[in-house]
Image (cartoon, rainbow, N blue to C red):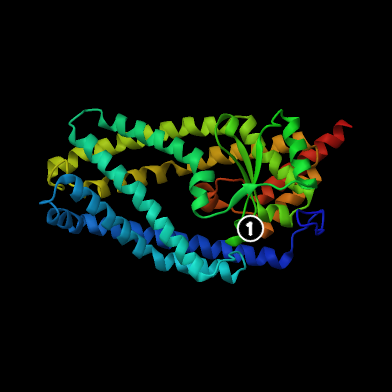
Amino acid sequence: MTENDQPVAYPYEFDARTRVRARELSGRSYRAAILSTALETLVLVILLALGIAERYALLLRGLPWQASAALFTLSAVLFFFLLGIASSYWRYRLRKEYGVSTQGWTAWLWDQFRGLLLSSAFSIPAALFLLYLISSGGVYWWLEAAAAFIFAGAAYSRLFPLLFARFFYRIRPMHEGEMKERVRKVLSRLGLERMEVFTMNESSRSGNANAFVTGLGRGRKIVLFDNLLEKFAPPEVESILAHELGHYVRRDTAAAAAIGVGTALSTAFIMSLVLRPLLDSGAVYSVHDPSMLLWLLLAAGAFQFALSPLLNMHSRRVERRADLFALGLTGDPVAFISGEKRLCDINMMDDSVRGLRKILFASHPPTADRIADGERWSGHKQDQV
């Protein structure tokens, strides 16, 4: 029985029609994302190469540098928001067409506006701080910038799921019942009885199902999407929960933070290498020129894109390890395989992403590979009996 006491088919098997539609959606979404990113990058390059960004920065030069940087940054955020809104709406309509999104267009538009507010609230202070560090004249300003980015990233990763996510979702303690007791039993196997259990109303936006662990120390919480509780069989929920707890128990977040530190340091160093030629060539008028931020953003984006195959490969290994942890904790490969198939259908994912798409963009193993792991684990356990 599910959270709403309605039975679901278990174990679940792929729906052939859904598989066809999911692969269509995945392909169309992938192409749309590539085109959107390429367009935004091309526009950014044009703004910089033709000196358009620099001319706008010169218009603001009469203002105090703090006001100039804030206004330039706000203008850039608004410009790229408007540039991407058509593509964003098209992807929203695509998700509606395939039954993934449950939002009305007014709710979607309100989400876009709230996202714009958050983006502006983060971008402007970050721009001012970065220009302050650069103008201070320190040789190792990039180390200070990296340290600030690392701190902000750590705070964001801890606070977003429950603090900033409340800007978009309702997150509430899970109500008492059979399913919560099953969740508590899984937690107790790992000595995590005190971990609080919450639910999040993802159904207000989409049919997607998932779970995650968030918070610090004794404030750790496990958050389950309402769709997970409504549409999945209890053994599947336990398996998915065990996967997320595997990340927590194996301290994958700490490992990810260490990788984040290395990425932040190397990205900031690349930015420092780009800065000197900009100043020497006169591409920017001074260390207070806000158009410099767009050059640094372009360099950082290109470097991180180059790193993405390595980062994704590591992420896929971490996710596979969490899968094996879940199988070991629950001892239920049927629930694991069933849950992966249902997740794939409900989230409308391509089950067998391969090639460049996997190398460049897949942070999780394809569902087909995860199912194969479950089947191998099952066969191995049977051989031991």
Q: Is residue 105 above or below residue 66?
A: below
Name the spot of residue 127 as percent of width and height, x first: 28, 44
Kindly identify the residue that appears in the image at 14 percent across and 46 percent down: 64
Kindly identify the residue that appears in the image at 61 percent across and 38 percent down: 221
What count of labels does the image hold?
Answer: 1
Kindly identify the residue that appears in the image at 80 percent across and 59 percent down: 6
Would residue 375 be found to the left or right of residue 108 on screen? right
**Residue placed under numbered mark 1 in the picture:** 347
Name the spot of residue 276 as percent of width and height, x first: 19, 37
Q: Which residue is more in the foreground, 283 or 221?
A: 221
Q: Which residue is more in the foreground, 376 or 92?
A: 92
In which quadrant is the C terminus drawn? top right
Amino acid type at image mark 1 = Asn
Name the spot of residue 287 as percent of width and height, x first: 16, 40
**Residue found at the very far right of the displayed protein:** 385
In which quadrant is the N terminus drawn? bottom right
Can I make out residue 15 in this image?
Answer: yes
- Neighbourhood count class around disc 1 (C-alpha, 10 Å): few under 14, some 14–19, many 20 upward: some
**Secondary structure beneath disc 1?**
loop
